[in-house]
Image (cartoon, rainbow, N blue to C red):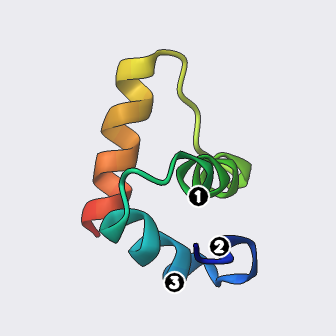
């Protein structure tokens, strides 16, 4: 198991992409993304679209 808490945001993003089954790492990445100013979602669909957009870049 990877210590995802010590990864940089860029490395964590890569880890989450490579390990989609790691729910804890994904949730940690979400908390980082949600903490950014300007990210406002009010539905699960908006969240999914925002995550896809960010993971694709």
The quadrant of the picture occupied by the N terminus is: bottom right
Image height of 44 relative to 36, above or below: above
Locate residue 5, reporting x and y percent. Answer: 74, 72
Circle 1 or circle 3, nearest the eye: 1
Above or below for 34 versus 10: above
Quadrant location of the C terminus in the rendered image:
bottom left
SS under mark 1: helix
- Give residue 46's quadrant in the image: top left
How would you rate the neighbour count of disc 2 (Cα within 10 Å): few for under 14, some for 14-19, many for 20 or more? some
Q: Earlier in the sequence, mark 1 or mark 2?
A: 2
Q: Looking at the image, is mark 2 or mark 3 earlier in the sequence?
A: 2
Specify few, some or many for label 3: CA neighbours under 10 Å numbering under 14, 14-19, or 20 or more: few
- Residue under the image location 53 percent in, 46 percent down: 23
Mark linked to residue 11: 3
- Identify the residue position indicated by label 1 in the image: 25
Query: What residue is shown at x 39% (from left), y 50% (from top)?
Result: 21
Q: In front here: 6 or 33?
A: 6
Q: Mark 2 points at which residue?
A: 4
Horizontal and vertical percent position of residue 51: 39, 47
Q: What mark, if any, has residue 42 been given in the picture? A: none
**Disc 1 from disc 3: Cα separation:** 11 Å
Nearer-N-terminus badge (1/3): 3
Q: Position of residue 27 (x, y in %)?
A: 61, 46
Q: Is residue 55 above or below residue 9?
A: above
What separation in Å lies between label 1 and label 2 (alpha carbons)?
Answer: 6 Å
Secondary structure beneath label 2? helix
> Which residue sits furthest front?
1
Q: Where is residue 14 in the image (x, y as percent from the top left)?
A: 40, 76
């Amino acid at each position: 198991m990877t210590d995802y808490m010590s990864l940089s945001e860029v490395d964590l993003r890569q880890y989450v992409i490579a390990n989609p089954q790691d729910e804890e790492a994904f949730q940690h990445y979400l908390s980082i993304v949600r903490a950014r100013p300007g990210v406002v979602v009010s539905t699960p669909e908006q969240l999914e679209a925002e995550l896809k957009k960010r993971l694709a870049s």
